[in-house]
Amino acid sequence: MLDEEQLVNAKSMSIIVTKGTLDWAYPPFILGSTAAAMDIDVTLFFTFYGLPLLLKDLDLKMTTLGNPAMKMPMAGKHMAMPNMISAIPGVDRMATNMMKNMFKKKGVASIEDLREACVEMDVRMIACNMTMELFEYETKDMIDGIELGGAATYLETATKSHINLYI
Amino acid sequence: MADATLNAEGLNCPLPIIKAKKALKGLDTGKTLAVTSTDPGSVADFAAFCNQTGNELVSSEQSGNVYSFEIKKA
């Protein structure tokens, strides 16, 4: 139980999670798990392409397409990925594996681990009901403990949160 | 001597904080946790973590590329 001082100081954060690629999965799960570790009450609302981040089996991928800011470290330099390269079969898979290896080598947590940390620290995760139906996802394919909700559910939480982010 | 230790060397943001939180959970109030890390960002992060959670940052030191923190559980 929180005492009165803790209740007064209690902080909360909500994030709308709209992107489900390997790279964009990091910001919500890093902020969510860290905030929870800092005793901040966290709600993540997964909608549209963020929804697959709730699937039991994560198969995260990324693409180099349309991202001129993505420059991979290579032999002391940085190499941009021209859009044309991304169209070659296998290139996005290669880029995904490169990124995953880079994360591992640099001691960066995997998305699976960060999500697990969020679950352990009672981060509230809401799946957008409408997008679930739209993309034909089923609750049984998603991790346990998630809630279903819509815009009103999110907004009620957001009006009471100190930090509201859209990622 | 701290009551518990956590080696977070080689781990990057936010793992040192998350693992420290987990380690603190198992400690009683007033007990201390000694953390070592190699992430330069953890210097500012452990200060912020302690400010927000009310745990006391007893010490924050650097030796070579290893950062050491002692945290007293509130």
Image (cartoon, coloured by chain):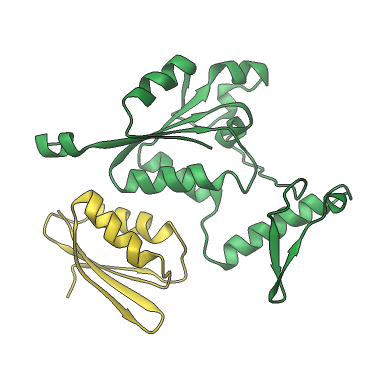
Position in image of residue A140 (x %, y %): 57, 24
Given residues A29 and B43, the one toward you in this image is: B43
Query: Please, which residue is most extreme toward the bottom here?
Result: B64
Given residues B32 and B53, the one toward you in this image is: B53
The count of marks equals 0
Position in image of residue B15 (x %, y %): 42, 58
The quadrant in which residue A141 appears is top right
Chain letter corresponding to the colour green: A
Position in image of residue A72 (x %, y %): 70, 63
Query: Please, which residue is most extreme toward the front here?
Result: A68
Quarter of the rendering occupied by the N terminus of chain B:
bottom left
The quadrant in which residue A153 appears is top left
Relative to A80, residue A147 above or below: above
Answer left or right for A103 relative to B41: right
Position in image of residue A35 (x %, y %): 36, 45
Relative to A79, residue A132 above or below: above
Residue at the (38%, 49%) spot, across then down = A34
Residue at the (14%, 55%) spot, across then down = B28
Answer left or right for B63 relative to A107: left
Relative to A148, residue A62 above or below: below
One can see residue B61 in this view: yes
Residue at the (51%, 56%) spot, across then down = A109
Chain letter corresponding to the colour yellow: B
One can see residue A1 in this view: no
